[in-house]
Image (cartoon, helix red, strand yellow):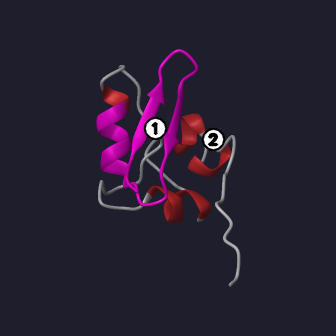
Amino acid sequence: MRGVSVDAECRLARVEGGAQWGDVTAAASEHGLVGLPGFSADVGVSGYTLGGGLSWLARSHGLASNSVTALEFRLFELA
């Protein structure tokens, strides 16, 4: 649940629900890119982003929540 895939051409990252910013930073840096991470690599991407996401780059690039293009949820049938 911590998978991260990067589409460098589109500058998009697909992040699984349990991923931390360290996972995103490692995957993005392979392509010379960076996300809008917080102050710690151990912070979860989902909670940080949905909470607004204030980073060192916020003044020049905005909050992490402004960079979200889609959310996808898996639904389960109640038995």
Mark 1 element type: loop
| 42, above or below 65, in the image | below
Q: Can residue 50 be seen in this view?
A: yes
What is the three-letter code of the residue carrying label 2? Answer: Ser
Q: Determine whether 50 is above or below 14 in the image.
A: below
46 is higher (above) or lower (below) than 13: below
Say left or right for 29 vs 70.
left
Write the residue at 41% across / 25% down: 33
- Quarter the C terminus occupies: bottom right
Does 45 lie within the magenta span?
Answer: no
Image: magenta residue range: 1-27
The picture places residue 35, in percent across and down from the top left corner, at 46, 38
Measuring 48% from the left and 42% from the top, which residue is drawn there?
Answer: 36
Q: Residue at x 59, y 65 (%)?
A: 51
Residue with the most extreme front position:
79
In this picture, residue 23 sits left or right of residue 7: left
Badge number at residue 35: 1
Which residue bears the numbered disc 2?
67
Q: How far apart are marks 2 and 1 (CA)?
A: 9 Å
Q: What's the amino acid at mark 1?
A: Gly
